[in-house]
Image: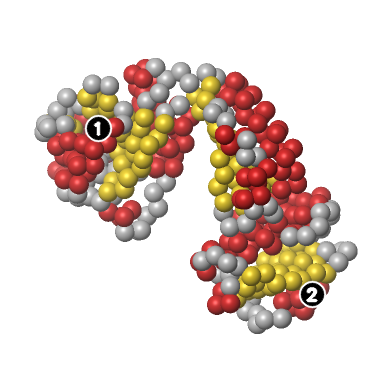
Amino acid sequence: MPTAEIITIGTEILLGEIVDTNTRYLARALRGLGVDLYRTITIGDNAERISEALRASLDHADIIITTGGLGPTVDDPTREAVARAFGTRVEFREELWAQIVEIISRYGRQPGENQKRQAYVPEGALAISNPVGTAPAFIMESGHRCVISLPGVPKEMEHLWQEAVVPYLQARYNLNQIIRVRLVHTSGASEAVIDERIDDLERLDNPTVGLAAHSGIVDVRIAAKADSVAQADEMIAGVEAQIRERLGDSVFGVDDDTLEGAALQAAFVQGWNLAAVESGLDGALLRRLTNAGAGNLVSVEEVALDEGQLPEFLGDFRARHGTRAALGIAAFPEKKMVELALITPESTSSHTRTFGGPSGLLPRWAVNIALNWLWRTAKGDQGT
């Protein structure tokens, strides 16, 4: 099975000005092809540093994918960096220039002189025309290894990946196996407890099973390698069934399911509409519930509360909005403590919890334990 590395290029990513979504997309795409991803790197717009990283990657990976740095300006250095890494120079391709001119003419414009830079690729490169943008991609080969340079604009990168790169990789590396992954989401049980219950499954070779904790939520990852999607899904299903049997009501969903979605759905099944308030969380609960897009969410608001005020305030808030249920969180980061309150048609409850982790993770943790409480209560379970 071939191995891969991803090099994301762009000073704006290093400075935190934009979020790199390309690496996540490519990592998942490589996984689906059955390619093992060893490392991802982000480098600024510096040709020498990029070429150094490329030479290092070529020493131990079969497939190196770069994104970004293929624009028309002087700070788009990928073409030059790849040429240096292969000990060659860039060359002008007339056919690429013709494609660029044609694409720009669609918008009633003439290309500037600087856009000719995009018609240059390293000598010997396999050029990939870009029908959805002005930055052609290219592939450089060295023995069984290759460097694939793609544009940084996500829509352009994804289009070229699907239409040109995937067929190339399948043919060059005889990629017959695929990798399928399922995430089983749990809440209310610690990573250590889950590890104890499925320890033997974590020792499997194929499918593999791993854990990832997220401040109140623990994901169980099942990954299977197989010759077909159907075969991989069958392998995953067998392991997933064992996980569900052992973890029981800790499992709230899989893959794209969310805890907020599960909690609101459980409330909906009970016939509860919901009002919610938060204090000291900088909108963490508001964003999660609003993004869930559930029809039984009547109102969620940010307020400023002192210690001990949440239960009475939540009761008044629920009465004002006329809902059957209400959820409230008041966080006090300086004390690493939160107050929680939940009102349902059957009961009114409140309590405090302390948090032992970094203060920056407190909002996520607080929202997760509150949503877990709502979810379990709506299902008829007890406790948080």
* Label 2 close to label 1 by CB (< 8 Å): no
Real-space CA distance between mark 2 and mark 1, rounded to the nearest whole angstrom: 64 Å
In the foreground, 327 or 235 = 235
Q: Residue 121: where, in percent of width, then height?
A: 18, 32
Q: Quadrant of residue 110?
A: top left
Identify the secondary structure beneath mark 1.
Answer: helix
Extreme right residue here?
346
What's under tag 2, amino acid-wise? Answer: Gly
Q: Residue at x 44, y 42 (%)?
A: 24
Q: How many marks?
A: 2
Q: Are there few (<14), some (14-19), or many (20+) residues within 10 Å of tag 1?
A: few
Q: Residue at x 27, y 26 (%)?
A: 145
Q: Residue at x 40, y 23 (%)?
A: 1
Q: Residue 200: where, in percent of width, then height?
A: 63, 35
Q: Residue at x 33, y 53 (%)?
A: 13
Q: Quadrant of residue 237?
A: top right
Q: In the rendered image of this protein, does residue 318 appear above or below residue 304? A: above
In the foreground, 80 or 366 = 366
* Residue 133 visible within the image: no
The residue indicated by pointer 1 is 59
Q: Residue 9: where, in percent of width, then height?
A: 28, 46
Q: Mark number for residue 98? A: none
On screen, residue 163 versus residue 371, left or right, reads left
Q: Residue 337: where, in percent of width, then height?
A: 62, 73
The residue indicated by pointer 2 is 315
Q: In the rendered image of this protein, does residue 165 appear above or below residue 40? A: above
What's under tag 1, amino acid-wise? Answer: Asp
In the foreground, 195 or 89 = 195
